[in-house]
Amino acid sequence: MGASMVEIKNVSRKYKNAVRPAVDNLSFAIPKQSIFGLLGPNGAGKTTLISMLCGLFKADSGEIVINEKSISSNLKETKQIIGVVPQEIALYSKLTAYENLMFLGQMYGIETNELKKRISENLKILGLKENADQQIQTFSGGMKRRVNLIAGILHHPKLLILDEPTVGVDIQSKTAIIERLKRLNAEHSTTIFYTSHHLHEAEDFCSHIAIIDEGKLIAQGKTTELIKENNCSTIEEVYLKITGHRFRD
Amino acid sequence: MKLLYCIYKEFKILIRDKAALAVMFLMPMALVFIVTIIQDSTFKSVNETSVPLLFVDHDKDSVSIKLEKALIQTNFFKVEKKEISEEETKNLVAEGQFLIGIIVPGKTSVQLREKAKTRISRLFPQEDSSSKHSDQDALQLKIFYDPITKESFKVSVSGAIGRIVSAIEMQSMIVALGEELKDISPEGKTGTIENKPLVETVQEYAGKNETGIVPNSVQHNVPAWTMFAMFFICIPLAGNIIKEREDGSAFRLLTMPGSYLNVLLGKIVLYLVVNLVQFVLMLLVGIYILPSMGLPKLDTGHNYITLFAIALSSGLAATGYGLLIGTLSNSQDQASLLGAVSVVILAALGGVWVPTFVMPELMRNISSISPLNWGLEAFYGVFLRGAGFGVIGIQAVKLIIFFTACVGISFYYQTYKRMR
């Protein structure tokens, strides 16, 4: 696990008319095959960083390297190896779960028979096989989140980026999603980059954690080491110790 | 291949959206029914054979018979004959039951013959002539007009009636001349003078295929509301784009390999097909359904390839406009408002509701900025003038340039502005 899947080098990004940069000279690395949690209060710069990792925003300065290639000069290649699970339910509500997954898989260029096999397998694992032909608009929040996850992993990405994948779901769906991600990490060596406000979930799930606030990195390391170094018993304690109790929104 | 998947996805979404389907197909058909029926009488009063004319015949002799026959033969008047007084005639016209009332006084024919004989006999003076009395007073035909009649219409109607009366007058003179010549001929025999006109005017429409179709309510309203329907799809199309952006699907698609242009093209192709289906349905309404309701049948002319080219370029302009509205709007509400208001304004300017040929000159000039006007003018060209692509090509080129500009701005805005 020595090499890095992602290297963020002195990256800054400031929105037009904003008082301060959303991401301010940020540098850290995400080891290959790790489950890396990015934590931070609202407005810390997490979503901006994800957008830059996906190639949607350009950094004002600095460099992002994914799988040893600079994203700015290898965007097409990079997009092929990353999978994204947005915070929104990025699915077509009038299409069925199966139709959504077929369309998104086809957009990744997956061969049709192989795609059908992967869809069937994932729907079964996440308990949605019986609902495959129902329109997404009839699904519960948890079911939508599970389909949202499948859409991001169909092409077996080397790096999976998840923006709060378990927000607003029941414990059963949350457990199913986390288990699926762990299995993906173990079986396909997928590096997982994950943001969440659920700190207990992050502590259990992530091998590495970084905490950012106001666009700056304020802590980073292996989850267990981070707790130990800060003389705390949980990540939540570490988080509050470092970021304080001030509201950020 | 990815483009095909995008088209298929859009198709599936569209056929499950009942409200959008109703807006795209039922609304324009309902509009073309209603507006064509409402406007039909207005178009007829200008173009067709239904100018109601009251003919009051107190003469009952050759002049009134010839005049009535000639009026009917013009195919311009719907002649109704009554035996009533001058006062009653005036009242019926004043009440609006007839646009025109004509009274032929009693003994008009007898007096005309006498006057013609008197004038001709003066060409051959004789001492014991009985035709020395004066014919200074002209005979009078009384014509009443409905007070709402426009001056231009009055002038053209009085011109037409004047020509008929002149012809009857001339015929009487020729008859009188023939009789006079018979009297002075040594053998009492003369030939006959033909009463055929020596100069004829040949009139035809300046269309390429010489079909000479006169515009009617169907020929205006079917292409006009087809253009409106085509552009009105900007609302569901813009809504589709914004929904994709709001629910995060656009974000996901932008993180995938391949150009986002495929996604936009998928929408353009599907909505273009919708536009062409709308076009065919509206033509079928004009050809089969409107005539069954007593309205004129739509004559599409014979340049079907040109017709298709116009429909295609109009459809491209409409989808491009929808794409632009969807890209520039920040919410579905904003897109609905902006799309509906802008299309209604462009339609009003473009001559969809009120044809441009009845607009004042200033508005006619302004209307030429509306893409709906470009399409409508091109359809008029094919339907009414039988124009080929060479003639209406400029309108098609304008529509395609409009489409290219809309797509270009949308793609630039989507790729470089909103995301960066």
Image (tube, coloured by chain):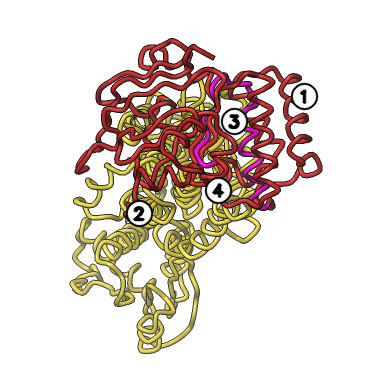
Chain colours: A red, B yellow
Quadrant in the picture for the C terminus of chain B: top left
Query: For residue B191, what is the image quadrant?
Result: top left
Task: Please give the name of the residue rendered at 64% of the width and 31% of the height, measured from the top-left corner.
Answer: A181
Query: For residue B116, what is the image quadrant?
Result: bottom left
Mark sitting earlier along the chain (3/2) = 3
Task: Please give the name of the residue rendered at 44% of the width and 28% of the height, measured from the top-left corner.
Answer: A221
In this rendered view, identify the residue nearer to me: A45 or B236: A45
Task: Please give the name of the residue rendered at 28% of the width and 20% of the height, measured from the top-left corner.
Answer: A62
Q: Position of residue A218 (x, y in %)?
A: 33, 35
User: Residue A117: which disc?
Assistant: 1
Q: Label 2, on which residue?
A: A245
Inter-mark Cα distance, 1 to 4: 28 Å
Q: Do callouts 2 and 4 mark residues in contact (Cβ within 8 Å)?
A: no
Mark sitting earlier along the chain (3/1) = 1
Inter-mark Cα distance, 3 to 2: 34 Å
Q: Label 4, on which residue?
A: A167
Mark sitting earlier along the chain (1/4) = 1
What subunit carries mark 3?
A
